[in-house]
Amino acid sequence: MHSATLQVNSTVGDILRSIRNVHSPIALVTGASTGIGKGFAQKLAADGYNLILVAKTGEGKLLDKVSGELEEKHKVSVTSFTADFSTPQGVDKVTSIICTLPDLHILVNNAGFGEPGIFHRKDIRTLTDILMVNVVAATRIAHAAIPVMLSGINKGCDAGTYKTRGIINLSSLAVFTLYTPNIVYRSTKVFLKGFSDSLAFELRNTGIRVQVLCPGLTRTDMYTKLGYDEGHPIYDKYKFMTPAQVAERSIDYLKRNKVMCIPGFRNKLLAFILSNIPRRLFYAFYDRFMKGMGKVVKWEKGD
Ligand SMILES: NC(=O)c1ccc[n+]([C@@H]2O[C@H](COP(=O)([O-])OP(=O)(O)OC[C@H]3O[C@@H](n4cnc5c(N)ncnc54)[C@H](OP(=O)(O)O)[C@@H]3O)[C@@H](O)[C@H]2O)c1
């Protein structure tokens, strides 16, 4: 077993030295320090994958903790390091590491964030950071990963438990609605759905499966960061899934080669209704729905 958690300022060279001993099957999860990414890291470690985990900050501390726990519990090797995907250099760091891997079985493009508020009032730097992290980084990382996965297939490497390679892109249930007061975030998730649908088709005969994962409300730090701490009424009013449930369903769908994964029956029903509701009806119901929602959430500071 091999373990290495690298510091914030680790160079690509440091990381490469540390992953030299990481063997197949390998899974790489972005945004793995908390929330859904951590749920994936736990699930994949339990399934015997050696992990490469990436997150943005925390000076390695959160990643340290996650990595240590997984190694101890599941006896897999875990390499983790930080990279800020809102910068081209942060993404370069991950893609250059992927290119040196002997093989890659699973990629979970999970890192992402959004910030609610009225589009034209938001800081443009925040909005471009959302585009960079949710769209540019995910696209570049998939672009780097596919040749590595294909080369593993060509070398006849064992594909592990799932007998295939897979790319899971984190979209959202928000793609089925016409509007959420988080326009750029929702639009990035629409991109990821379209990207995954097409990529799944393009790769259909290669042995690489592609999934677009569309979770609904999931109890993670995303809401803590927005100010919804423990005890906030949002958690009583709406049903949240856990990251572990989301990761479990996603991997189950990957095994069954399903491109679209909407975890949870309620979310599936909501996606169906939202996809089929006429535009005019959506507009008519939207304000009513938001009035109810407005009792428990604030979209912007000062609203
Ligand atoms: N929670 C939900 O209800 C929900 C619903 C639908 C879709 N999703 C999607 O699921 C994914 C995970 O969300 P979550 O709820 O688990 O969020 P979370 O708990 O806030 O975790 C987000 C993860 O992404 C990383 N990250 C954020 N900005 C980054 C950057 N600039 N560079 C590199 N990594 C960065 C974070 O790293 P640090 O911790 O180091 O900052 C963290 O590991 C996101 O793509 C989100 O859009 C979530």
Image (tube, rainbow, N blue to C red):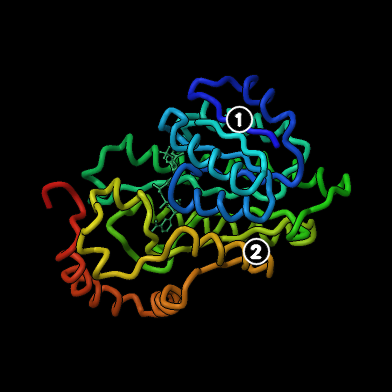
Element on which disc 1 rests: strand
Q: Give the residue drawn at x 26%, y 38%.
A: 123
- Asked if the residue under mark 1 is in contact with the one under mark 2, i.e. CB atoms within 8 Å, the reply is no
Q: Earlier in the sequence, mark 2 or mark 1?
A: 1
Q: Position of residue 174 (x, y in %)?
A: 39, 63
The residue identified by callout 1 is 4
Q: Residue at x 38, y 53 (%)?
A: 220
The yes-or-no answer for disc 1 within 8 Å of ligand 1 is no
Identify the residue position indicated by label 2 in the image: 254
**What residue do we see at 50% from left, 69% from top?**
262
Q: Which mark is residue 63?
A: none
| Amino acid of disc 2 | Leu
Q: Nearer the viewer, mark 2 or mark 1?
A: 1
Query: Which element type, helix, strand or loop, lies under badge 2?
Result: helix
Q: Is residue 219 above or below residue 136?
A: below
Residue occupying image coordinates x 63% and y 54%: 46
Quadrant placement of the N terminus = top right
**Residue in the foreground of this view, choosing between 178 and 30:** 30
* Amino acid, disc 1: Ala
Q: Residues within 10 Å of mark 1 (few under 14, many from 20)?
A: some
Picture coordinates of residue 145 (x, y %)?
Answer: 68, 42
Residue 188 position, x and y percent, is: 44, 51
